[in-house]
Image (spheres, rainbow, N blue to C red):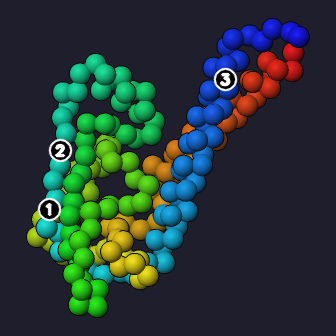
Amino acid sequence: MKEVDPTVYLFLLILAVGLVLFFVSSYFILRGLITLRWKPNHAYIEHSEYSGSDNEGFAGVFLRSLLGFLGSAPSHKASVRYRYFVMEKEFFGERIQIGRLPSGDRNRIEKFLSENTKGEVVEIYYNPVSPKQSVIKKGPSSDSVKMLGLGIIMIGIGGYISSVFFAV
């Protein structure tokens, strides 16, 4: 039996990570698509806060540059809590969007928070079957779509290069 080049394992790892990204992001995209059928309602923003720092050290800068194409910046986060009523029953929600990364680009976070400040009444979407499930933004998130694209690219690269190594 011919000995396999050890670098093929790197590409098999890329393939495996690509498959995981593909299936996880597909799940969130499908869940996001389901929210398109959810009913609109008005909610009162009780809490709206930015947390983060531009002083993130070497690890944060490295991670930001590594994941920059995803639009994520691990040090910036939006925190929102809203209250709404369905059939005279009170519910609370904190979810912005299904499949959205918890942290992101500072400008995107600040824009979102400026549109959803404490004390404002905003439109949310709730699941009519289970009203305790709600989101501020319906539909699949751009983060999930980007992760799906990354997963497909990784599957392609890992699969193609691994097959070339095994074909030799």
Instruction: Name above or below for residue 119 compared with residue 5.
Output: below
Within 10 angstroms of label 3, few (less than 14), some, or many (20 or more) residues? Answer: many
> In the shown orientation, is residue 20 left or right of residue 95?
right
Q: Secondary structure at mark 1?
A: strand
Within 10 angstroms of label 2, few (less than 14), some, or many (20 or more) residues? Answer: few
Distance CA(mark 3)–CA(mark 1): 45 Å
Q: Which mark is residue 51?
A: 2
What x and y, as percent, mark residue 142? 46, 53
Q: Which mark is residue 47?
A: 1
Question: Measuring 52% from the left and 44% from the top, which residue is drawn there?
Answer: 147
User: Does the rendering let one see residue 114?
Assistant: no
Which badge, 3 or 1, is on the more N-terminal residue? Answer: 3
- To which quarter of the image does residue 73 belong? top left
Q: Mark 3 = which residue?
A: 11
Instruction: Name above or below for residue 154 compared with residue 136.
Output: above
Question: Measuring 44% from the left and 55% from the top, which residue is drawn there?
Answer: 99
Q: Secondary structure at mark 3?
A: helix
Q: Amino acid at mark 3?
A: Phe
Question: Measuring 25% from the left and 36% from the top, which residue is drawn there?
Answer: 75
